Image (cartoon, grey):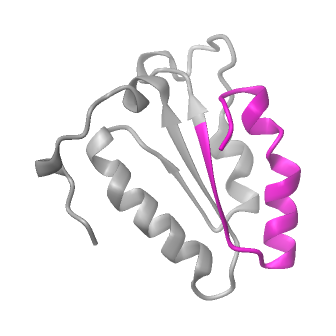
Amino acid sequence: IATSGPGATNLVTGIADAILDSVPIVAITGQVPRRMIGTDAFQETPTVEITRPITKHNYLVMDVSEIPRVVSEAFFLAKSGRPGPVLIDIPKDVQQQMLQPSQWQPT
């Protein structure tokens, strides 16, 4: 788990090692609020784009209701086939939303 910007970029070496060594990991990073993505906001880093070549899959979660499915899929993908890293990037405003029990469908 890492913050947006420099926190996320500090994970890059570990993620690259994981893909080369077939280590299943799920990295979760913070991101600026959705309305600020693409505006060069303070500590905004295109984490998904930076890590795309060194992960099995990337997610940019844009709605809190996606989190249970995304986390479940991420762990499945990290362990399936040739193991490797999967990244989940969650904007700050999505992190601060409440997920109602009716929105969560366990898999």
Direction from residue 24 to residue 102 in the image, left or right:
left
Q: Quadrant of the N terminus?
A: top right
Rendered view: 36 above or below 24: above
Quick check: 106 left or right of 48? left
13 w.r.t. 2: above or below: below
Q: Quadrant of residue 99?
A: top left
Measured from the top left, where is residue 47 in percent x and y?
67, 39
Residue 6 shown in magenta: yes
Toward which corner of the image does residue 8 lie, by quadrant? top right
Q: Which image quarter is the C terminus in?
A: bottom left
Residue 62 relative to residue 14: left or right: left
Taking the view exactly as shown, the residue that stands out farthest to the top is: 42
* 60 is within the stretch colored magenta: no
> In the rendered image of this protein, does residue 32 appear above or below residue 95?
above
Q: How many marks?
A: 0
Which residue is painted at 37% across and 50% down in the image?
67
> Seen from this angle, which residue lies furthest bottom?
81
Region in magenta: 1-29
The image position of residue 75, as x and y in percent, is 52, 69
Residue under the point 60% across and 80% down:
79
